[in-house]
Image (cartoon, rainbow, N blue to C red):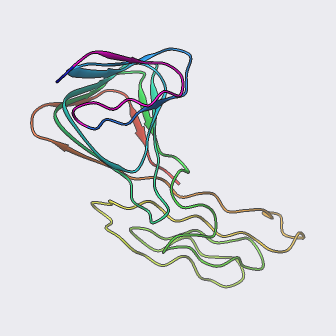
Amino acid sequence: MWRRSVVERGTLVAFAVALYIICVSSAPCLVDPVTTITANCDFSAGQYTYDVLVIRSPAVVRILSNSSGGGVTIFANSFTLAAGAKMDGAGLGFGNNSGPGALAAVRYGGAGAGHGGEGGVSYDTGLGGRAYGSFTEPTTSGSGGSAAVYSNCAQYGNGGGGGSAVRFVVSGSANVSGTIDMSG
């Protein structure tokens, strides 16, 4: 039941392997037995299964997490992230002041959220967000940093969002020449 499909802006693609891609570019995403992504797309939290997945430049594939911190898992026999292509989950995990490793807003200077380790400490409380998840094999999204609550603080403002999470299970070859950024 494989067939070649072209996805234009904002069009949902669904076929035999339940692929869900939303294109946000004017250029089409091309989908066939060798799944090749050539335009900017979003992968919503969940599991995706491919025989061969190739992401080519200049595509940026955003990795979105869900409200409970679940990320994306990609199962493939072969995976290639070509030079110039990017998988981007930077700041797309839990929002500021939220997630299991977030610390409530603090008086001066905010605090870093925890994830695989404790978060950076706040200026006034000496506390950071609590550790959760795995340091070596994280599978959940990062928590968001906390905000400072007084405007006389030089760092006044909201904390940043945590990074999303992506997990690859590749049974054959994997070639990563592009960028994978899940930073918070």
Quadrant of residue 135 in the image? bottom left
- Quarter of the image for the N terminus: give it: top left
The answer to whether residue 9 is above or below residue 48 is above
Q: Position of residue 141 (x, y in %)?
A: 43, 59
**Which residue is outermost to the front?**
1
Q: Position of residue 124 (x, y in %)?
A: 72, 82
Q: Residue at x 33, y 32 (%)?
A: 14
User: Is 133 placed left or right of 69 in the picture?
Assistant: left
Q: Residue at x 54, y 22 (%)?
A: 9
Q: Residue at x 60, y 75 (%)?
A: 121
Q: What secondary structure prevails in the magenta region?
A: loop
Q: Residue at x 78, y 63 (%)?
A: 155
User: Is 163 placed left or right of 154 in the picture?
Assistant: left
Query: Which residues, given as a range, are shown in magenta?
Result: 3-17
The answer to whether residue 93 is above or below residue 17 is below
Q: Position of residue 74 (x, y in %)?
A: 26, 43
Q: Nearer the viewer, residue 153 or 138?
A: 138
